[in-house]
Amino acid sequence: MGKRKSRTSKMLAQPKKQPKLDTTFDCPFCNHTGSVECSIDLKHRLAEAVCGVCKEAYSTSAHALTKPVDVYSEWIDACEQANDGVRRGYYDDDKEGL
């Protein structure tokens, strides 16, 4: 005769549930919380993130594994890359001359 499985061994055998990823995000331009929504069109291989408040948008190519958080992070990376060429402290230098 075999021993019955205890409840704890059944609980340990079950895989842990993956946490849900965000679907709404903060806008990098107007800073409204939860105003950016991402849509993914796999038929046309297009992913788009749009702010509902200031109407700023970003679009990129999509594939089968693309999630809304991927689109948003690409948008943030593109914003940071665009700002790399901007001189730091530009406005502070102008005030000294006045």
Image (cartoon, rainbow, N blue to C red):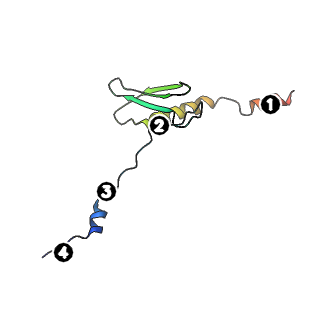
Above or below, comparing residue 57 to residue 14 in the picture: above
Residue located beneath label 3 in the image: 15
Q: Is residue 86 left or right of residue 62?
A: right
Single out the mark in the foreground, 1 or 4: 4
Which one is nearer the viewer's eye here, 13 or 64? 13
Residue located beneath label 4 in the image: 3
Single out the mark in the foreground, 1 or 2: 2
Q: How far is mark 1 from mark 3, CA to CA?
A: 57 Å
Q: How many marks?
A: 4
Asked which secondary structure carries label 1, the reply is helix
Outermost front residue: 53
Coordinates of residue 12 in the picture (x, y in percent)? 31, 64
Task: Tell me the kind of residue under disc 2.
Answer: Thr
Q: Quadrant of residue 27?
A: top right
Residue located beneath label 2 in the image: 24
Q: Earlier in the sequence, mark 1 or mark 4?
A: 4
Q: Is residue 37 left or right of residue 28?
A: left
Q: Residues within 10 Å of mark 4 (few under 14, many from 20)?
A: few
Asked which secondary structure carries label 2, the reply is strand
Q: Residues within 10 Å of mark 3 (few under 14, many from 20)?
A: few
Above or below, comparing residue 54 to residue 3 in the picture: above
Q: Which quadrant holds the C terminus?
A: top right
Task: Tell me the kind of residue under disc 3.
Answer: Pro
Residue located beneath label 1 in the image: 93
Q: How far is mark 1 from mark 2, CA to CA?
A: 38 Å
Single out the mark in the foreground, 3 or 2: 2
Asked which secondary structure carries label 3, the reply is loop
Q: How far is mark 1 from mark 4, CA to CA?
A: 79 Å
Q: Is residue 43 left or right of residue 79?
A: left
